[in-house]
Image: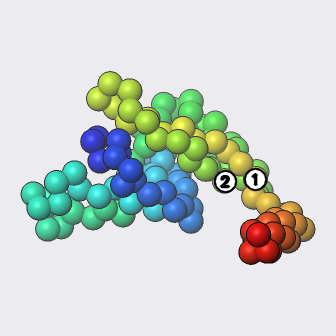
Amino acid sequence: MLTIQRPFLTTRFSGASRLASNEAFLIGANIPAYQPKNAPKEYDALRARKLLLTKSELEELKNALGTKGLTIVPLSVYNKGRFLKLDIAVARGKKKFDKRQAIKKRDVERDLKRSL
């Protein structure tokens, strides 16, 4: 839990979470051991973490993921008491033209910063 409170948690999610047999898992979150020297040798910081969701939440996510183009995206991680909470959302990815516009905008901003 304390590892999450430190700035060590990195979330580079290729597939943020997946649903398999009525369970949800967080994929791609790097959660290092709190005390690396005391951690067991087989500790895997990148392992899949099980998300504890109610049946109704799981059904809602399954129905949302049934729609083409939607995916589960983590928004934030925080602690509440002794539990770690993960805010997730169902989102639609960018279209190709949106990606092109974002790249153009980023290139223009980069050129402006270089010129200054």
Q: Residue furthest front?
A: 116
x and y, in percent, of residue 2 in the image: 27, 42
All told, the count of numbered labels is 2
Is 99 placed left or right of 7 in the picture?
right
Q: Which residue is mark 2?
A: 71
x and y, in percent, of residue 45 in the image: 31, 62
Quick one: SS at disc 2? strand
Image vertical order of residue 70 relative to residue 14, above or below: above
Kindly identify the residue that appears in the image at 84 percent across and 66 percent down: 105
Image vertical order of residue 113 relative to residue 85, above or below: below
Amino acid type of the residue tagged 2 in the rendering:
Thr
Image vertical order of residue 95 relative to residue 80, above or below: below
Q: Is residue 48 visible?
A: no
Q: Which residue is mark 1?
A: 92
Q: Nearer the viewer, residue 84 or 116?
A: 116
Kindly identify the residue that appears in the image at 29 percent across and 47 percent down: 3
Kindly identify the residue that appears in the image at 29 percent across and 29 percent down: 82
Dots 1, 2 in contact, CB < 8 A:
yes
Quarter placement of the C terminus: bottom right
Q: Nearer the viewer, residue 115 or 28?
A: 115
Q: Residue furthest top?
A: 81
Amino acid type of the residue tagged 1 in the rendering:
Arg
Sequence-first disc among 1 and 2: 2
Quarter placement of the N terminus: top left
x and y, in percent, of residue 100 in the image: 85, 71
Kindly identify the residue that appears in the image at 11 percent across and 61 percent down: 37
Q: Is residue 7 visible?
A: yes
Is 82 placed left or right of 30 in the picture?
left
x and y, in percent, of residue 11 in the image: 48, 57
Q: Nearer the viewer, residue 111 or 28?
A: 111
Density class for disc 1 (Cα within 10 Å; few <14, some 14-19, many ≥20) is few
Is 38 placed left or right of 2 in the picture?
left
